């Protein structure tokens, strides 16, 4: 067999193999593809798992389990919105209580991760209606309710602190306004005039100054007073004369010539 024949034979075998593989792939059911995807998810080979799940949906678009697993892959890839859409599709096409419970539980967990507490509680309560014995669901509900209570207490404490601070600020403002009003009242012109008038009305203090001698008016003098004054004048004149004579005697030179 020459080389040309060998090449043609190889091509024929390859085409036959591809045709057989294509026929085999076509015959693989959505369930089988979904199971293969689960194995890939466990190995954390998410792109391969996602590819199997998309093929499975092409074969069975209303398969709830396939939508559920695709949502799990999208959630692991941090695509929360797309994951929620897949979970909602899984819930829409769910035919058994188990399928409904799984979809509701996954929706609850996704909402819990997104800190959507009320939404998560709603999904968990619906999940319990499908499986009242689910311990994990009950635990998650209890945790969420405790978180709600803690958040309310925290908000209440913050509100009390805010109110106390507001009351303190109001009191400080009132005290400050009162001080300003008192100071303003003290600075009123009327009060200052009143204080000046009070100082003016007080008797003057002369300190150590000597009080002036009383003056006699002429119409108040009698004869005795006149005689007394004249006597004092004569005595004063006599003293002046005496002092003058003494001075003159002291300064006069002696008549004798030694």
Image (tube, rainbow, N blue to C red):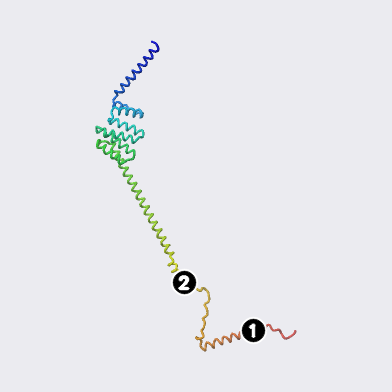
Q: Which class describes the residues within 10 Å of circle 1: few (<14), some (14-19), or many (20+)? A: few
Left or right, 204 with respect to 28, comes to right
- For image coordinates 37% across by 53% down, the residue present is 166
Tell me the quarter of the image containing the C terminus.
bottom right
Relative to 139, does residue 177 appear above or below in the rendering? below
Q: As rendered, which of 146 and 29 lies closer to the eye?
A: 29
Q: Nearer the viewer, mark 1 or mark 2?
A: 2
Relative to 81, does residue 31 appear above or below in the rendering? above
Q: As rendered, which of 52 and 155 lies closer to the eye?
A: 52
CB contact under 8 Å: marks 1 and 2: no
Helix, strand or loop at disc 2?
helix
Q: Residue furthest top?
A: 1
Q: Quadrant of residue 91?
A: top left
- For image coordinates 46% across by 72% down, the residue present is 200
- Alpha carbon distance from label 1 to label 2: 52 Å
Residue 219: x %, y % from top left: 50, 86
Residue 149: x %, y % from top left: 31, 44
Residue named by callout 1: 244
């Amino acid at each position: 067999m020459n080389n040309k024949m060998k090449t043609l034979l190889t091509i024929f075998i390859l085409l036959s193999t591809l045709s057989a593989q294509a026929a085999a792939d076509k015959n693989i059911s959505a369930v089988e593809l979904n199971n293969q995807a689960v194995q890939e998810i466990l190995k954390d080979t998410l792109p391969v798992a996602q590819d199997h799940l998309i093929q499975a949906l092409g074969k069975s678009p209303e398969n709830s389990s396939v939508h559920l697993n695709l949502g799990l892959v999208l959630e692991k890839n941090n695509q929360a919105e797309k994951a929620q859409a897949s979970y909602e599709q899984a819930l829409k096409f769910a035919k058994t209580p188990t399928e409904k419970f799984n979809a509701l539980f996954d929706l609850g967990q996704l909402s819990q991760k997104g800190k959507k507490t009320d939404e998560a509680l709603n999904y968990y309560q619906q999940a319990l209606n499908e499986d009242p014995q689910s311990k994990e669901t009950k635990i998650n509900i209890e945790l969420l309710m405790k978180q709600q209570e803690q958040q309310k207490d925290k908000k209440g404490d913050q509100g009390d602190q805010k109110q106390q601070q507001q009351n303190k600020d109001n009191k400080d403002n009132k005290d400050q306004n009162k001080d300003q009003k008192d100071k303003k009242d003290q600075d009123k012109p009327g009060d200052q005039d009143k204080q000046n008038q009070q100082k003016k009305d007080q008797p003057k203090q002369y300190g150590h100054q000597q009080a002036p001698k009383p003056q006699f008016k002429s119409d108040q003098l009698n004869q005795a007073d006149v005689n007394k004054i004249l006597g004092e004048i004569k005595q004063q004149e006599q003293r002046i004369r005496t002092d003058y004579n003494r001075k003159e005697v002291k300064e006069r030179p002696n008549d004798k010539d030694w």
